[in-house]
Image (cartoon, rainbow, N blue to C red):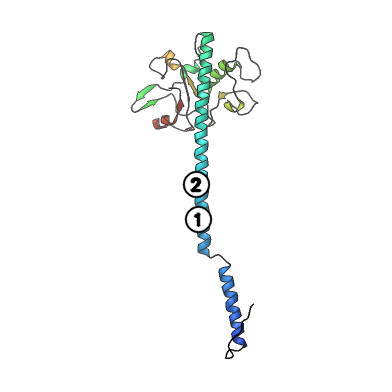
Amino acid sequence: MTTEVLPGSCSGVCVKRLGYIGAWHKHRYNAFTLIELVVVFGLILVLTGLVLSTVGYARKKGARARAETEIAAMSAACESYKADNGVYPRDTTNNTTDNLAALTSQSPPDPLPTSYDPSNAAYSSASFYLYGQLSGNINGDRSTYSQKSYFQFKPNMLSPAGAAGTVTAIRDPFGNSYGYSTANQANPSYGFNPTFDLWSTGGTSNATDAAYEKAWIKNW
């Protein structure tokens, strides 16, 4: 506590009282008020939300760019496969690539596929067949290659993710199975391309509405 020289008319009581006032002011200006704390926390929450939304947007944009690159690379591999075999990869035994169609009927303003949901078994069955034909690993054990390989799949492109476990599907950057279809070869009113349709649902894993098709990354 500090003191200061007072006029002669002021007693020691005045000195003591001034000391208390000085201490009160020091306490007042060295602490945050409740309103100030609320404002600070509010700003932190706003900034955190902005950062998270920016990071989420960047990740989604990166995933879409990677899907476009992978679709282009697999499409090129399909062309190499056709150059050697005279046909594009097509399952004529179990019809898995014909059973999945990117278009089954034109329902204005959107097309209607077999399913908008890539967790549907038709997606994994068709993409697994494509994996076997392009990789040469027909049984999916990641070790037995019984025919020529046209594409080297990275571990993060396969389900289950990683370098172990029997392959069940080709995995897009959103964690879902790619769609692969040769339905147009079986039925000209199905599908978009007379060769093959290859697409990613772009993370719309639970989509049941035709509007979600606009978010797909596709080769048509």
Callout 1 secondary element: helix
- Residue positioned most to the bottom: 9
Please give the label number shown on residue 42.
1
- Which residue sits at x=50%, y=54%? 43
Residue depicted at 56% across the width and 19% down the height: 131
Q: Quadrant of the N terminus?
A: bottom right
Q: Report which residue position mark 2 lands on.
A: 50
Q: Position of residue 103 (x, y in %)?
A: 40, 22
Residue pictured at 61% horizontal, 86% vertical: 13
Front one among 1 and 147: 1
Answer with the quarter of the image where residue 7 lies.
Answer: bottom right
Q: Position of residue 84 (x, y in %)?
A: 54, 9
Which numbered circle lies on residue 198? none
Label 2 or label 1, whichever comes before in sequence order: 1
The residue at 52%/44% (across/down) is: 52
Q: Residues within 10 Å of mark 1 (few under 14, many from 20)?
A: few
Farthest residue toward the left? 108
Viewer-closest of 100 and 200: 200
Picture coordinates of residue 11, whole percent (x, y): 60, 89
What is the secondary structure assignment of the residue under circle 2?
helix
Query: Residue 23 in the image: x percent, y percent?
Result: 60, 75
Q: Amino acid at mark 2?
A: Leu
Is residue 39 visible in this depiction of the protein? yes
Label 2 close to label 1 by CB (< 8 Å):
no
